[in-house]
Each structure stands twice: as structure tokens, then as C-alpha cells.
Image (cartoon, grey):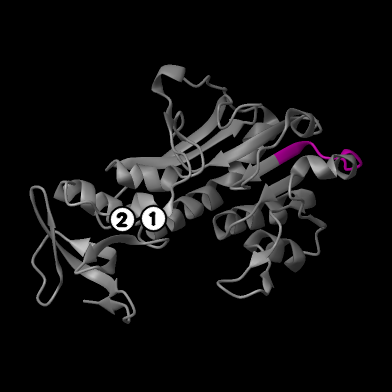
Amino acid sequence: MKILLAGTPSFSVPIFEEVIKNFEVVAVVSQPDKPANRGYKLEPTPVKLLAEKYNLKVFQPNKISEIYDELEKLDFDVFLSCAFGQFVPDKVLKLAKKAALNVHGSLLPKYRGAAPIQYSLLNGDKQTGITIIYMVNKMDAGDMIFKKSIDIEDTDTSDSLFEKLSILGTENIVSWLKDFEKGNFTAEVQDENQVVLSPKLLKEDALLEPTLTTEEAFNKIRAFSSNPGAYLFVNGKRLKVYYASKKLIKNAPILEFSDGKLYAQDYQFESKKRVKL
């Protein structure tokens, strides 16, 4: 089975590497390179680096429709997307002889959109997972083919859950694709009454308002643990909180909320070094 891959961040890399090792990959599509940190030097996407490691052809369009003519020349059975970061128009999806499939980091129809991992933490969910769906001309709305769940622990953050789901996808992608190739699956229509959206989160969404309950604040800190980091203001200065404890920790900054306190276990005051207790 010949596959065209489309993905961008590190989440996709181990999943795609398993695909490359077990199937014929004709090319890879990724987002354009972007400046690293605050510098001007362009940094390649993790998926681009993976493609180069295996000497695969890489396309990096601003919009995938810009390379339609080049993709049309390729011979592939499956278009496989994982955290690509662009809307893929119907005419591109139809280039795949068998199907266009997407690897999504939630248990659909819950959390369609760009930030499923963060929303599962924000809402205090106890489970999440990976869903493989047919790609259609509506975001994350296609019929579900394969689904596998994992538990979310209280200690999980967006970083740890990102890693767990990437591993889950990596462990199962080859068997899923082989079953798909053989027709060993039953497609399930998503229940539109159960749809929950997870749109892109903004920096201001990470603010820890004092009106939050301790549980809401705890979940928000976990959801924003790496980027940009949940924050509040203390005496006019920003305090970023990367992780907090519900239990008393000696010398930890106390975070007061509507029904109690949290203790900043991993934090950084503005213009100061990050502290981990």
C-alpha cells in the first residue's frame, strides 16, 4: 500500500516512522519552516527532519492546494494525516485511490479541532485516546474506523499526555493500516449530538482567574503546562505556573482560588529563573 504522509510536529514523528518502515511512502507534506524562538533562523519541522532522514520527497506549501498538480502526479492509495495543521480540500483528498485518513488525538466525536489534548485536561476528563477517521470536507467529522483509549492520570500534563498519545498511535498504526488494507474494520458514523469542539487556545486563555475553583485551576495548569504556561499576577508581576500541588509544599507560592488553595510546585516569576520544588 502506497501512502502520502501529511504532518508537522513531533507528535507525528514516531507514528510516521512506523509507517515509513512498514509501507511504501511516496512523499511527505509538512508546514513551512518557521523562525526558531525569537531568532530569524528558520527551523525545519520535526516531520520534515524525519522525511530527510529517510530521503523522502518533502513538500512545504503555505496551503496544500498550491501543490495539487505535483500531488496529482504521485501514485498513492492512502493520504494519511496526523497533526498536519492545515485544512485539506476535497480535491486533494480525492487523489488517494483508497481513502484519506486522519490520526486524531481524542475519542471522537469529543474534541474535534486543533487542541484536543489540552481540552481533555481542561475539562478534567479521566480518559482520552486516538481515533482514526476518514477525512471529509469538514474538520474531524468523518466516519470513525479505529479507536483506542488510555486513562488520564491526575499527574498528567499536556506534555505527558502528548507523549502517551503519540506512543499509543505508534504502537497501533501499523496494525490499523494493515487491517484497513484488508478491510478488517467497521466504520462508525459520528453522533453529531455528542460533538464537542476544541478550537485553538490563545495565550489569554491561560490566565488563572481567582474566581476559578481549585479543581478548575489545577486542570488549567495541567492543560497549559508547557506552552504558554498558566499564569496569574502577583503584585503586578506575572507568575507562570507549570505544575501545582493540592497538598501543602514548603516554600511554595500559595495560589488562592474561590474554594481553596493550590501550591506552585514548578513556577517562574517574571524576570526570574524557573523553580521546581
N-term mark: 2 or 1: 1
In this view, the residue in front, 238 or 220, is 238
Crowding near the residue tagged with mark 2, few <14, some 14–19, many ≥20 C-alpha atoms within 10 Å = many
Query: Residue 13 is drawn in which quadrant?
Result: bottom right
Specify whether residue 236 is painted magenta. Answer: no
The residue identified by callout 1 is 158
**Residue 212 against residue 271 in the figure, above or below:** above
Which residue extends farthest front?
Answer: 236
Amino acid residing under circle 1 = Ser
Residue at 46 percent across and 19 percent down: it is: 192
Residue 178 x %, y %: 66, 39
Quadrant of the image containing the C terminus: bottom left
Query: Which amino acid, mark 2?
Result: Arg
**With respect to residue 249, does 13 lie above or below?**
above
Disc 2 designates what residue?
222
Question: For the stretch drawn in magenta, what is the main secondary structure?
Answer: loop
Q: Which mark is residue 22?
A: none
In the image, is 276 to the left or to the right of 196? left
Please give the range of residues in magenta: 72-79
Residue 150 visible to an observer of this rendering = no
Q: Position of residue 127 (x, y in %)?
A: 33, 41
Label 2 with label 1: CB-CB less than 8 Å: yes
Task: Answer left or right for 148 relative to 9.
Answer: left
Dot 1, crowdedness within 10 Å: few (<14), some or many (≥20)?
A: many
Q: Quadrant of the N terminus?
A: top right
